[in-house]
Amino acid sequence: MTASAPHQASTSTRPPSRARRDPALLVLEDGTVLRGSAYGARGARRGEVVFTTGMTGYQETLSDPSYAGQIVVQTAPHIGNTGANAEDMESRKVWVRGYAVRDASRITSSWRSEQSLDELLLSSEVVGISDIDTRMLTRHLRDAGSMRGGIFSGDALEATEADLVSLVREQPTMSGSSFVEEVTIAQPVVLEPEGEAVGTVAAVDLGIKGASPSSMLSRGLRVHLLPATSTLEELLAVEPDAVFFSNGPGDPAAADDQVELLRGVLDADLPFFGICFGNQLLGRALGFDTYKLKFGHRGINQPVMDRETGKVEITAHNHGFALDVPLDGEHTAPHDGGRYGRVTVTHVGLNDDVVEGIRCLDRPAYSVQYHPEAAGGPHDASYLFDRLVDLVRERRSGSAAPASSTLPSSQKES
């Protein structure tokens, strides 16, 4: 701890009898310094420090592209006990810049394990830290808000703590940052469902997790996975019955090209479904603003109210920005004199009243802020993909209508 640091940081959580591994530091922009053990790769990594409350699914968290540019703190104290395997990767690589845990498991206890989590972090060049008080760190981030930080080990520790704090403060903030071109695919990919396709979805990859196309394929939808840099002409060339915008990292206010693409989709009156980043971009396309949350929602246990059915869903979240839409009533979308008609808030977070979903009343478009594909996490909201199938069927039958507030056909039957 530097003399000028305003917050007293805990050192190790291990008993004194257990030997410490290579040292590491986690440094925050406000001068807080936590001392622990090196975990994964050695070196220096800087990013926005955020926490996630999931008790399970650490590998899915690491491989979620929405965490690009961030150092992730796990609030669950024991991490790595089931190891890692290729099947549970949610994308092509690990995306977090840094990783902070309390107790890193020294062994793996799962028949599915192919390598230890430490080995996955090392091969992915993720600089991590263990043996720190993650409870204290989480409480501090809740009070002060997510902030810039860095994890340093190995040769990076030759610098003074004051120099490391200065280095952390030099990096850009998450506000205004864009990672879309970093995480998206380079070329289009076509994914075919088993059996006969009921329709075609153009899925724009803003940082998509593998569970999203899997959710569509399992429902008989052919998926054209498109780069985030695709033009409207390229999107329309696949002759989609619907369009999907995925989750993704960064500030939605920096995604102007994707907002314009989405406006083209709305102008074409194509059914649209967006999740997470896609939800924020739908709001922006309609003319609403976004704002940065103090510490965000990250975890797999967030309660959300579906205001149109009264149902409470336990949902998976990973977002640091939110939509600024009035919660009550119907509102004319502000963009271009209201050309997209009326909008209503369909889902609200019960912890803090954050907008968690919107629906267009005069266009076949809807979106949610959370992750209905939820890998890992609950499956309370998987019906939202059934609603997409219903819109595809309606369009193919020539009866496309605004996104229905009623339950999808699969739930009506039950």
Image (cartoon, rainbow, N blue to C red):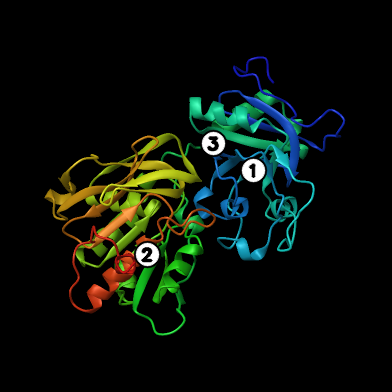
Please give the label number shown on residue 247.
Answer: none
Mark 2 surroundings within 10 Å by alpha-carbon count, few (fewer than 14), some (14 through 19), many (20 or more): some
Q: Position of residue 224 (x, y in %)?
A: 41, 73
Question: Which corner quadrant holds the N terminus?
Answer: top right
Secondary structure found at label 3? loop
C-alpha separation, residue under disc 3 versus residue under disc 1: 18 Å
In the depicted structure, whether residue 121 falls above or below residue 382 = above
Asked whether disc 3 touches disc 1, contact meaning CB atoms under 8 Å apart, the reply is no
Q: Amino acid at mark 1?
A: Tyr
C-alpha separation, residue under disc 1 versus residue under disc 2: 32 Å
Q: Position of residue 219 (x, y in %)?
A: 40, 73
Q: Amino acid at mark 2?
A: Phe
Q: Nearer the viewer, mark 1 or mark 2?
A: 2
Q: Nearer the viewer, mark 3 or mark 1?
A: 1
Which residue appears farthest toward the front when viewing the image?
414
Residue pictured at 56% horizontal, 24% vertical: 30
Which of 244 and 102 lies nearest the eye of the viewer? 102
Q: Position of residue 371 (x, y in %)?
A: 44, 54
Q: Which residue is mark 2?
A: 385
Question: Which corner quadrant holds the C terminus?
Answer: bottom left
N-terminal-most mark, 2 or 3: 3
- Work out whether residue 108 can be spotted: yes
Q: Which residue is mark 1?
A: 99
N-terminal-most mark, 3 or 1: 1
Residue pictured at 56% horizontal, 45% vertical: 54
Q: Amino acid at mark 3?
A: Gln
Residue pictured at 66% horizontal, 37% vertical: 151
Q: Which residue is mark 3?
A: 171
C-alpha separation, residue under disc 2 versus residue under disc 3: 38 Å
**Residue 294 left/right relative to 98:** left
